[in-house]
Image: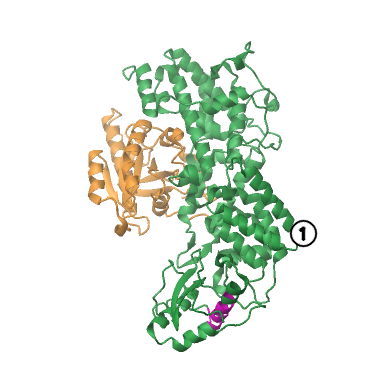
Chain colours: A green, B orange
Amino acid sequence: MILSDEALPWVVGGGALVVVAVTVGASIVYKLVSRRRYLAHRDSGVNTALLEHLEQTKKSAPKQIAYNTIMDSTQSTPASHTPSTHTPVQQSHKPSRHTSSNQKMFLQLWLNRTANEGYPLEDIVIGLETPDHIQHNSDGSLKFATLHKLVENLIKNGNCQHFFKEEFFATYTSFTTPNKLITTLISFSNGFHNDNDVKHESVCLDLIEFWCRNNLNDLNLCTDKERLFTTLFKYVNKSDLAKSKNVASILSTHIKEAQPAPLQSFMVNTPLQKKEVNIQDDLVNDSEDSELEAGPIYPEGDSDFQTRNEFNILEWSPKEIARQLTIIEGNLLKQISCYELCKSRYLEHNMDKSAPHIAESIHFFNNFSLWLVSLILTFDDVEMRAATIQFLIELVEQLVGFGNFNSTMSVLGAINNSAVTRLKATNELLPEESIEMLEAVNELTSSAKKFFNLREAVEGTPGCIPFLGIFLTDLSLIESVNKDKKVDDVELINWNRCKYTANICKQLQVCQSGLVKYQEIEFLQTHLRSVVSELSEDDLYERSLCVEPRSNKA
Amino acid sequence: MDCDVLYKVVVIGDSGVGKSNLITRFTQGKFSKDSKPTIGVEFGAKTIEHEGITIKGQIWDTAGQERFRAISAAYYRGANGALIVYDITNQETFNNLNKWFKEIENQGENGCLNVLVGNKCDLDHLRQVQTEDGRTFAEKHNVSFMETSAQDNTNVDLAFTSLLKEIYKNQKKGKKTGGNTGGDSSAEKGKEINLHEPVAQPTEDDKKCGC
């Protein structure tokens, strides 16, 4: 009999856990995991002693609390790890989903499993089987489901339902953790979850492999990485299936590669897929359009630029600057993972940690833009300022040609900065065609109607670099309008919301996979990436007032 | 023509203060379930009647882009009004108001009217910013103030409509004192009022918004 006097020192994690203090003869402290129904495992011995004892003696107060806690724990979500003190009457707001025999079986199984096999408790994730844990839209598609039901659907229908698998793995970090997902998959693999006790080892291994191939980097942003690796290795080592070796090798490779700098960003240069560029014909009338990938173009008559330390962007062809910016933006873009897009991580205060690559991209965006403002304002000479703005308008035109809409927005931000637009004398010197071009590009990038024009351009330009802000705005709207859980049942995950989010993730992934490879000029890469304005935004406005004072009403 | 005048209103403030929810509540926009949830419907527009004319408020929402500071000028361009929002349950969003006021002052249009809004007033038990503090701040900056709740629809309509009416009043006044032909009463009878800056073309809007 395992109900001895000794305390079972289980350390349990996760939300679905209740601590029950029971007095049975001598004091015994049990920590029960999960509130969920659990069907008897084939190999389980049956031990009904605990429940029977509780049932027999539930009239006595402390025991009743303990008993009720077990009942509670299977019916409603425990909000914390503290023992519940509900009575059955108090918590009857929801129809009971479970029979006491289920609970008995759950307990039997749990006691057996934990005692006999030494499983750490958190590795046993127990699921619900009742129909109200899944709800459908009117068209029959999934609307709400528990994590368990989602994983079950993933296992049974992941390969046949349209994009379910992709949607699931793109958004799972918005409703669970990598650790919980993997342990759930493992428990399905071991056949803990269904009436016939069918093991899903093969399909679960496939799914875990899929996860490893696509989502391993999620772990770089999680805290319990080590523990998950241990769990995974333990699992694959136990498996007899040949494909478990695949998982093991992916893991080993990842660990090896991740060692020096798991988040080494920016400089990573995996070979990019080469693709045809579809040019915005209406905006770029350059005869060299078809040779976007050609290059590089060096400053005229200046072959020793590399030996000099100073960097003068105006010496360079706008096209070459545009190309190098596109390389930088491409590298920034491809590092952004679905993880960073989920759960409003890009809005968090510690964004540098919660969504580091999005933060890096936005940082470069703002930094570069501000530097360009400072560049324009460097010149005391009005003609030089005008020439600089003209150069930037040409640069924008080229950026649109390269389909680099993120840099387009950034450079336009500089040209449209109030410290620049207020320079009347300067702007009057701009040639007509520059002004027309600026108007055209402003129209293209206008935020009117949720960036309608820009969205069309992005869709019509394979291999482009989209303006990241559109994705974030869409996501933020999706997340603020759709609750993550069902209002009256926090266990039910709003799958519709996940689908919307996944759609944005997919758009990002399409852009990432279509990036075009261009030839780098190291000199420009280094300098463009490290530019920084010495003046703050306020100082720049002051500087603007200085070069063209307010009284100057030309 | 679906409106007599069209005003652009931007909604600004820290992320998480509930800007999108305010807009959704005001425009009663239903969240579109198609693959492009934010376009296809003119999500942020609403028409109100005032003094016999139809005012269309085009509410611009760039929630999620708060950190793209470099493009804020483009966002503010042509804005007739701004709703500056903080969260009454989050002191920091109130502390950051100076930053937002400064930004709209620097980058926004001349004559852009502002309203200060303390959102989430349904969560009074979590309140960190007292109503009085909000009011004092608003008075200091000479803007009107109210507390709202997108959750239970408190003052949401009021916040937007009073701003739109105020803009209308201001424009009318500006027009009269601005030396335009005196007896231009047609402005009130269906002609487009001369806005500071043209907002998006109304003709295009007619096609898209379907209201």
**Disc 1 residue type (three-letter):** Ala
Q: Is residue A42 left or right of residue A491?
A: right
Q: Is residue A101 magenta?
A: yes
- Give x and y (percent) for residue B45: 43, 47
Q: Which residue is outermost to the bottom?
A: A56
Q: Nearer the viewer, residue A494 or A200?
A: A200
Q: Nearer the viewer, residue A48 or A140?
A: A48
Which residue corresponds to the image point at 46% horizontal and 69% vertical from the top-left?
A: A77
On the question of residue A429 being in view, the answer is no
Q: Residue A259 occupies which quadrant of the picture?
A: top right
From the image, give the main secondary structure of the stretch colored magenta.
Answer: helix
Q: Which of the chains bears the disc numbered 1?
A: A
Q: Nearer the viewer, residue A398 or B33?
A: A398
On the question of residue B73 being in view, the answer is yes
**Image quadrant containing the N terminus of chain B:** top left
Q: Which residue is mark 1?
A: A242
Tell me if residue A419 comes above or below residue A146 in the rendering.
above
Q: Nearer the viewer, residue A225 or B30?
A: A225
Magenta region, residue range = A98-110
Q: Residue A373 occupies which quadrant of the picture?
A: top left
Circle 1 — which element?
Answer: loop
- Give x and y (percent) for residue A212: 66, 52
Report how many numbered discs are placed on residues in the image.
Answer: 1
Q: Is residue A307 magenta?
A: no
Which residue corresponds to the image point at 62% horizontal and 29% vertical from the top-left?
A: A401
